[in-house]
Amino acid sequence: MSAPLLELRGLVKHFPAGAGTVRAVDDVSLHVAPGETLGLVGESGCGKSTIARLVMRIYQPSAGSILFDGAELARADRARMQMVFQDPFASLNPRETIGRILEQPLLVHRRGDAAERRDRVAALLQRVGLRPELAQRYPHELSGGQRQRVGIARALILHPAMIVCDEAVSALDVSVRAQVLNLLLELREELGLTALFISHDLAVVRHMSDRVAVMYLGQLVEQADRDSLWHAPRHPYTRALIAAAPRLDPSAARTPRALLQGDLPSPIDPPPGCRFHPRCPLAQPRCRQEAPALRQVGAAQVACHFA
Amino acid sequence: MSASAQPGLLWRLSVNRSAAGGAVLLALILALAIIGPLLWPGDPWEMAAPPMLWPGEDMANPLGTDVMGRDLAAGLVSGARVSLMIGLVSTLIAAGIGTLFGALGGFYGGSVDAVLMRVTELFQTVPSFVLAVVLVAVFRPSVATAVLAIGIVSWPATARLVRAQFLLLREREFVLAGETIGMGTPRLILTQILPNALPPVIAMSTLTIAHAIQTEAALSFLGLGDPNVMSWGTIIGGGREQLAEAWYVCGLPGIAVVVTVLAFNLLGEGLNDALNPHLQRR
Amino acid sequence: MALLDIRGLQTWFDTRAGTVKAVNGVNLSIQPGETLALVGESGSGKSVTAYSVLRLIEAAGGRIAGGEVLFKGTDLLKLDAAGIRAVRGNRIAMIFQEPLSALNPVQSIGTQIVEALRLHRDIGLRAARERAVELLELVRMPSPRERAEEFPHRLSGGMRQRAMIAIALACEPELLIADEPTTALDVTTQAQILALLRELQQRLGMAMLLITHDLGVVAEIADRVAVMYAGRVVEEGAVGALFDRPAHPYTRGLLDAVRIEALPPGSRLPEIPGIVPSLLDLPPGCAFAPRCGRASAICQAELPALRAIGVGRRHACCHPHLEPVPA
Amino acid sequence: MKRRGLRPFVLRRLWQVVPVLFGIAALNFLILQLAPGDVVDVLAGEAGAATPEYMAQLRAAFGLDRPLPVQFLHYLGNLATLDLGFSFRLNMPVLGLIMTRLPATLLLMTSALAIAVVAGSLLGVLAATRVGSWADTALSWFVLLTYAVPTFWLGLMAIVLFSAGLGWLPSGGMYTVGAGHGALAMIGDVALHLILPAVTLSTFYMAVYARLVRSSMLELYGADFIRTARAKGAGEWRITLVHAFRNALLPMVTMLAYQSASLLSGAVLVETVFSWPGLGRLAYEAIRTRDLNLLLGILFFSSVVVVLVNLLVDLLYVLIDPRVDPAGRRA
């Protein structure tokens, strides 16, 4: 395997919250190889978006380190790593035209003269499936799908080596979602991008990724290539996630299946030992005391005593 | 902010009844303040006619005279200039301090924010008018002290608004996007946050002007006006003793204050309506 | 006789830009004890249809411009204010998408259930409180007696939705309208709530109108399904039949777009081109025609009516798919 | 209702008052330092009311030859022992003067506030339930006009109309001289004198609350939980009072905290107009005689009153909003 493009080492991010501390990300180590797409999946509050923001340097880590291309992330050129945001309504400045929004990254990084920038914006708009005339429009004049295409164009205009997609399609309607996913697939292929693809939807993550990492309450519980994870999930939480996803086949959907009991605990005061133990069907007394480390089991890395 | 950044703002303002009404009223008051001295030349402090002449009694002094026989029309015109000037300048000071404090606190958060917020809270705890009274009294009444005192007591509301806007916008995805494409802090604030944070501040500033004009009138009413300047509050304060016999001496300048403040309030509300939906619609 | 029979319902919103015909001639019926899912994307009119049944749409700025909503033969649209209030929460109850905002923040869960009971039943406060605890038990709220005293913000998302369901079930309604009941919840909680709804519906024998954008939820819980597009029902049928043989190209497109698991990872997804049309100016013919690969001249000219193709199966398309979905 | 840890909340909130008081003291000290002339000139008043010997003594006592921090500590010490100095004009300790005037001001403020809250809520609810009606339009004009009318001028015009013109109500003061035998007669007399100033002071706040209640009610009518209440079959009155108004009270209480300071400011002007013998009137007298020490004392003391009022409002908020966790921040 080649040297990773992105590497997280023992990454920790805590936020002070009133009386306690939100342990948003607690000791996560990950790596993404060049050209690879790593999917990151989990429910709300599992820390996946915090990881995206740490990688994009919106947050500073509380502990641990992030390496980009073998060097400290802080020294990396920001242009090499770009992000596609979740909410196509909130991610574009309402007071700038689409053209201006797309031009901003070029201005910041002093790329090209006015004419070159204009051409680049027009070409990219076309590439993401939008008419170049849209450059004169304001975000509120566009549909959700069009806005998300603009968001993708903005992420690509600096020719990044890597993109981070944080719930990039979860705010879109089903019929538009497929369009945007296809666009992402095409562009990734065409530009040889490395990607971190984050979503709560395991099916989407599996479709888009080479490898998948599953998070629960700020920690990694399982990591494997997409097919082993999908067909032979090892961690009880991964299994529960797969079981909980609604089936599209009405006859299969009616068969009873094991559902997780209880609710997601608060990340302010996570359970001791294995954080999943209060909801885990396999939990033993040991799980209450001892946090399982991530270990290699077959093709997967799993953090469970009984996997 | 360029006009093109707000599509249809002027249109929205013109169809907004309160904004249009406020603008018309304001234009009238401004016109009066500018051309008034041509219509009623002479010193508003000078005795022009017999004292306590009722309005309409003598067309040479259409609005009558006060206890000292000073022409009320000339006084009102002078008051308009003073009120508008003090209102505008003190609001500029307040908006400046408020925006700076609010922006710094909202953008940086943490201890910077904590310190600035404590200061803001302090200024909101101290009764602002009493503070203005003390400042003017200690530093001697003059136009300059009035402007400064009103400015100093008026900024907290703006600071809170700007801070709230910054806190909100700071977490918005388009601002984060600006950060991820590598924008420096000044560019981030100037191109991404401020254009979105300012509209409500502008709307609020018109309300601040209105409040400043009221405060100035109250200060002069208490006898803390510039002794060399005839302002509306001064006339009201002077007419108090003869309130029962000649209420118009207090009444007319009061109406002038009401109309001016009303004009700014209407304009501010109109601006608020016209500027806000853009952001609220997301 | 159908429990609920919606005939030619039209619900419009008057805006400055013109009249938005959010629901434009919808026909639906629900049998006692049956679950009908109403599916569509945002702006399809599915929620507006649901809110029109209890006439809650008027408070949201909408206007019911035509049609009938027959509940056991009574037209709900013709009832006076007291009449419709006697139906709301009593014979037809409703649950919503965002359980946190749908619960009054300054009242305890118990108080809110008691209110629902006492609005329609002649029951003392003490008895109502007891009943509230029983209802919380029914929706499997952990330690119900303690939870009844809690305020909504102290509960988790799943517990809040359980509390909402308890409120809705207080008067044992014959019909439960559920507007996207699981959309705001996490995947694992979503599965719990769906299982609970299915179980309660069977146990209490009530009918359910389920509004959702998620075809997976439909497959899990519905008996029949109606698909809406741009304010109209474009296809309707039993869940199994409709999922196996979607006739309308839009239904087929929707199903294809979400059958992501069946495709080889990384392959191109089937997509529906274009965007949902504006409800302000709909094309004269079939609203889906501009995005439809099978559209012909007739589609642009003529609005296709819902036509029956077998028992309980209807579609509104001039060029329907007749072959089953390839496995 | 389960309220945990109310006592620690009060204690913590009391503790938070300390830095605010320190800030107020610092502000006063700053004004003194920046004032023209030295501190003693300012404190004793310029017009030579104090004897030169006393001024010299004061200079020594203030330690004006000593470094600023020491002077500040000294100043803090005085304030901490509630020693606000001496008014040479009125020949009384400042604290004593303030204390004799405080009850009148508190009476005026609380009556005005009560009128404003009750009438404002009623008007606001009325307007919200009849949006677009003539009553709603009339209220919006009332609000607009009231926002524009300076309180002191409103008071003057009220005197013109109700005292000078109609002769219904006394034009000023708190008691009728020579009248007042028996407690009941005295209360009646004070109440009669109170009407004009209290209503005058309340008008602005009445408008503020009416507008606030109206807009929060309208916002709440669109809230999801109101929709739930409708779906339960609740009637419009029940929805308005039990669900909407109860929640509309929350922003009103928040507003109350912000306005306690402004209410005191307003009281200064209203008392001046109506010769109401409270702190405001005292401040006016201090301005007239350039008794700056007294003025600074009033500034310090009225700030303290605001701090205490805000403390009460915070407590009230915790009691009416279950989402506020007394142990921490708002959930």
Image: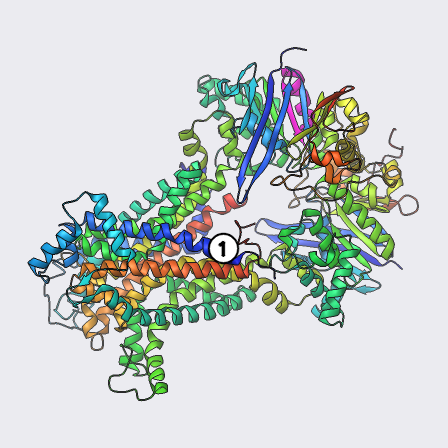
Is residue D33 in view? yes
Which residue is depicted at the point 92% across and 44% down?
Answer: C310
Q: Disc 1 residue type?
A: Phe
Image: magenta residue range: A180-199
Side of B152 where A53 appears, left or right = right
The chain letter for the residue carrying disc 1 is D
Find residue B99 and report its horizontal and vertical position in percent: 37, 42
Q: Which residue is mark 1?
A: D9
Dot 1: what SS? helix
Find residue C314 and report its horizontal and vertical position in percent: 86, 45
Foreground pick, A232 / D167 = A232
Q: Is residue C286 above or below residue A202?
A: below
Q: Magenta: predominant secondary structure element?
A: helix
Which image quadrant is residue C150 in? bottom right
Foreground pick, B112 / A63 = A63
Q: Is residue C265 above or below residue A268?
A: above
Find residue D260 and report its horizontal and vertical position in percent: 38, 61
Q: Is residue B191 above or below residue A120?
A: below
Side of A284 where B15 appears, left or right = left
